[in-house]
Image (cartoon, rainbow, N blue to C red):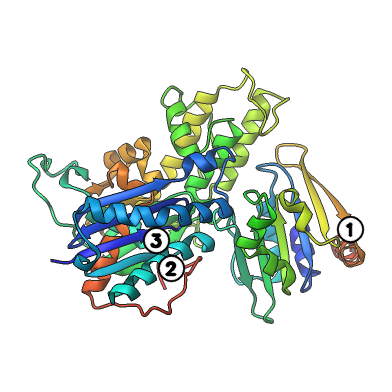
Amino acid sequence: MLGRSLGTVLQDGDIICLSGTLGAGKTSLMRGIAAGWNANERPTSPTFTLVNEYHRQADAQRLFHIDAYRLNSPEDVCSTGLDDILAAYGVVVIEWPERIREVLPVDVLWADIQITGDSDRAFTFSARGPRSQQILSDLKNRYTG
Amino acid sequence: MTLVLGIETSCDETAAAVVRDGEDILSNIVASQVDLHAQYGGIFPEIASRAHIEQIYPVVEQALETAGAALPDVDVITVTRGPGLAGSLVVGVNMAKGLALGRSLPIVGVNHLEGHIYSLWLAGPEYRFSRSDSPSADGEHIPIEFPVVILIVSGGHTELVLMTGHGEYRRLGGTLDDAAGEAFDKVGRLLGLPYPGGPSIQREAAQGNPSAFDFPRAWLRGNQGKQNFDFSFSGLKTAVLRALKECDPEYVTDEPVSEMIPVVDMAASFQAAVVEVLVGKTIRAADEHQAKEIFIAGGVSANTALRSAMVAEAGCPVRVPPLSLCTDNAAMIASAGYFRFSAGERDDLSFDVLPTWPLTR
């Protein structure tokens, strides 16, 4: 539900960072985001391809799903075309964002996922600029309202 | 006679091969980057791309030399066009285009997954296993019979495919989240084992008890409650993580695992869960589509537990590639390209790489 709510409030240019250990549920949250955003397909792991791209019926907007675990230099970011994706319009969701912290724009919504029990997770969101503050307050309204 | 030069650079192996008439390997050269990436626990794209550039020329030269052939002897150049890492694919494709242009040779772009399937055309009769037929130990070659159900399992792919003829495929299902090989890599990482996870887990599992942990089997059902042919390995990864924390409440990923963790039993139980679902769904697909044969292809087909379980439970012959052809190589690309070339296919030199090219277009 949380991912789905987040997916409904996202717009072109938004960047969501999903931080959490292996098995924390980053890809699961992404699946919710994609569903809320109305993606045509169900996301699969981007680990092998590094970048997966999704579309929807409503408009020409694109949703990018990135696994940055194997990116550790600005050259990597460049050679995978991630710099172009970050500069272009579209919604971008990044797993393992801490790996490419230095190339990320300032205004991102950062979600920390902590494993608190067998099937319990704690989500801590931090908004790092005006647009991400707006997303966070929209999410709050959507999720609690 | 048709001599095919194959080139493959889709991921972390720089490979070139010369194959005669689609089935005879004259040379099969693979320069692996595993050591280069092992220290990071995964393939780093920029490092991979640079290594391909350094190795592609000597690898192609060596493939021709080992085959006792020169470029003018080659009839067609085949190259992996996708799926794979864009920065890696482009190195092989540009090399292939350069050679084709320089020698006015035809060129055929090949799907990497189709390449894995054609590794079975390169496997000798000793790689066909059947419980019902008399063993073909006398070396007699038994031709492949369609339809074939193929399980493609590797680090980036888990696909169940029905093949009804050369180049004719129907996708029956695939993974909804992590690829099987990716699950091996990630669980290997959770257990503190060296990358790549496949061989590491198989080694540990050999000494462990596969029933020690009851890890979940995701059989996945469709709307009518009927099992479908999709796979899911993400929940299994989470179940292993949960078991790790039960054995050692202080467990933290990417730190050395404590002695409280029974690594061999966890590896064995994890492998058993993956194998059971892969084998169960493949055999059901083969029954449903009255397959004459089952193929296992891709890097994970090197797993001996998977091979023996499939052979033991299948109602039809099972073919597996030799270990040297399980992982990425160019001979399989040359073979797949040969059959496309024989069917009259040619690409013009303007074609681009396709990093997310599905097998079934």
Q: Quadrant of the C terminus of chain B?
A: bottom left
Question: Residue beneath label 2, please?
Answer: B94
Q: Which residue is mark 3?
A: B112
**Split into 4 quadrants, where in the image is the N terminus of chain B?**
bottom left
SS of the residue under disc 2: helix
Check chain identity for marks 1 and 3: say if they share one.
no
Q: CA distance from mark 1 to mark 3?
A: 42 Å
Q: Amino acid at mark 2?
A: Asn
Q: Is residue B37 shown left or right of residue A133?
A: left
**B153 or B286: nearer the viewer:** B153
Residue plotted at (46% across, 68% down): B357
User: In terms of secondary structure, where does tag 1 sit?
Assistant: loop
Mark number, residue A96 = none
- The type of residue carrying mark 1 is Arg
1 and 3 marks in contact (CB < 8 Å): no
Q: Nearer the viewer, residue B354 or A95?
A: B354
Q: Quadrant of residue B348?
A: bottom left
Q: Are marks 2 and 3 in contact (CB under 8 Å)?
A: no
Q: Give the residue type that dot 3 points to.
A: His
Marks 1 and 2 belong to one chain: no
Q: Which residue bears the numbered disc 1?
A: A128
Marked residue chain, label 3? B
- In terms of sequence position, does the residue under pointer 2 or pointer 3 come before the other? 2
Indicate the secondary structure of the residue bearing disc 3. Answer: helix
